[in-house]
Image: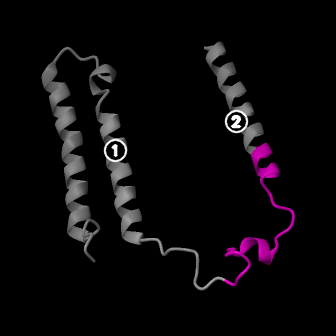
Amino acid sequence: MLLISSLGVILITITTIVMMLAALLSKKSIVDREKSSPFECGFDPKSSSRLPFSLRFFLIAVIFLIFDVEIVLLLPLIIFFPIPIPSIWLSVGLFFLLILIIGLYHEWNQGALDWAH
């Protein structure tokens, strides 16, 4: 137990040091308006170089990630529940899937899955 907690402290310390170094080294010292504007062979840009980002696509991606993580949590169900009765595995798995289906129905009912809008 002592070994696991000492490894945890070491990992947290290393992670904190790396995050602080990354934050310190990634700061730009000079913000120049010319350097941050798009460059088109010395001419002024005709239009914005930034394409508009679809918020619908972002919402669909977030919903996909949520359901993907929940499915990943469902897969090791047999390992984490070493119960000799398969009906308990089945009931817990079906309950978890029921929660996923209710969440999917809620998203569909709210219109978050309508791509055409």
Residue 47 vs residue 74, the one in the foreground: 47
Residue 113 vs residue 42, the one in the foreground: 42
As drawn, the label of residue 8 is: none
Q: Residue furthest right?
A: 29
Residue drawn 31% across and 20% down? 79
Q: Position of residue 113 (x, y in %)?
A: 26, 65
The answer to whether 65 appears left or right of 105 in the picture is right
Q: Position of residue 46 (x, y in %)?
A: 60, 85
Membership of 48 in magenta stretch: no
Q: Which residue is mark 2?
A: 15
| Amino acid beneath label 2 | Thr
Residue drawn 82% across and 50% down? 24
Q: Which residue is mark 1?
A: 68
Q: Residue furthest left?
A: 87
The answer to whether 94 appears left or right of 111 in the picture is left
Label 1 residue SS: helix
Give the alpha-carbon distance from disc 1 to disc 2, as whole Å. 26 Å
- Asked if 44 appears above or below 67 in the picture, the reply is below
Label 2 residue SS: helix
Give the residues in magenta: 20-44
- Asked if 76 appears above or below 85 in the picture, the reply is below
Marks 1 and 2, the one that precedes in the sequence: 2
- Graded by Cα atoms within 10 Å as few (under 14), some (14 to 19) or many (20 or more), the crowding at tag 2 reads few
Label 1–label 2 contact, CB within 8 A: no
Main SS of the magenta segment? Answer: loop
Q: Position of residue 109 (x, y in %)?
A: 20, 68
